[in-house]
Image (cartoon, grey):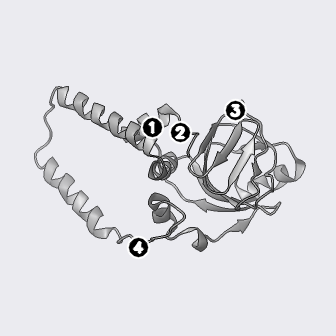
Amino acid sequence: MIEHHPGDDLLLSYSAGALGEGWSLAVATHLALCPVCRAAVAAAEELGGVLLDDAEPEAISEGALNRLMARLDEQVSSAPAAPAHAHAVLPQPLRDYLGGDVGSIPWKSIGGAVYQHLIPTNDSSQARMLLVPRGRPVSEHGHRGRELTLVLTGSFNDHTGRFSRGDVEDVDEEIVHQPLAGKGDDCVCLVITDAPLKFNGLLPRLFQSFIRI
């Protein structure tokens, strides 16, 4: 059962289409796993539709609708068909970005038996897949901004609680922690940050620019 969800600000921004790409990827992936947040976003979208219906209409340029429909047709025709994954580990939004399931991720070591895979986005966020072997910690760190961590396999815990599949940990500059992967499956997470982390250890600080974390 999912116990930790994205903040209301993220869900509302997502429903309004105002969320950056990296954050949107995390929210969309969480929504694929969480019926509670799907219902919340649906309610927000419905409310937004009502407000839009009540808004005063504004004139648009001639041919604007035709141009919009043509762009939508181009996007639909160029989108590859999603492959069938009856037993997929990763939800569809994330598989679309990665081009496959968790077994196809080209992991790169970042030390301490931890691996990552960077996901390019078109906003200022940094999206990454993170793999932490069961029972292993990540380096203790603080934050210069916001960090969103969505668990996809396994679990981890820190002083704020325990997080398992579908759970989201949302932290900021006030939190210093050292997440520890649970003893079950390896912990695979989607992590979104908007600023570099603040590592307490010397070695992580020395290699931080190379591993882009």
Q: Which mark is residue 11?
A: 1
Badge 4: residue crowd in 10 Å (few <14, some 14–19, many ≥20): few
User: What residue is shown with label 3?
Assistant: 173
The image shows residue 129, relative to residue 173, as above or below, that is: below
- Answer left or right for 96 relative to 119: left
Question: How far across and down, in percent of the image, does residue 168 sit?
Answer: 59, 44
Residue that label 2 marks: 6
What amino acid type should be assigned to the residue bearing mark 1? Leu
Look at the picture and state if 17 lies above or below 71: above
Camera-near label (4 vs 3) is: 4
In the rendered structure, are the residues bearing label 3 and label 2 in contact, judged by CB atoms less than 8 Å apart? no
Could you tell me which secondary element the residue under label 3 belongs to? loop
Q: Which of disc 1 and disc 2 is earlier in sequence?
A: 2
Residue 154 placement (x, y as % from top left): 67, 57
Give how far across and how far down residue 39 sits, in percent: 38, 40
Quarter location, residue 177? top right
Front: mark 3 or 2? 2
Q: Is residue 89 left or right of residue 135?
A: left
The amino acid type found where label 2 is placed reads Pro
Of callouts 1 and 3, which one flags the residue occurring earlier in the amino acid sequence?
Answer: 1
Query: Tag 4, which secondary structure?
Result: loop
Between discs 3 and 2, the one toward the N terminus: 2
- Horizontal side of residue 176 vs 86, given as left or right: right
Give the residue type at disc 3: Glu
Closer to the eye: label 1 or 3:
1
Q: Which mark is residue 83?
A: 4
Measure the alpha-carbon separation of dots 2 and 4.
28 Å
- Earlier in the chain: of badge 4 and badge 3, it is 4
Cα separation, mark 4 vs mark 1, equals 28 Å
Looking at this view, is 152 or 73 the one in front?
152
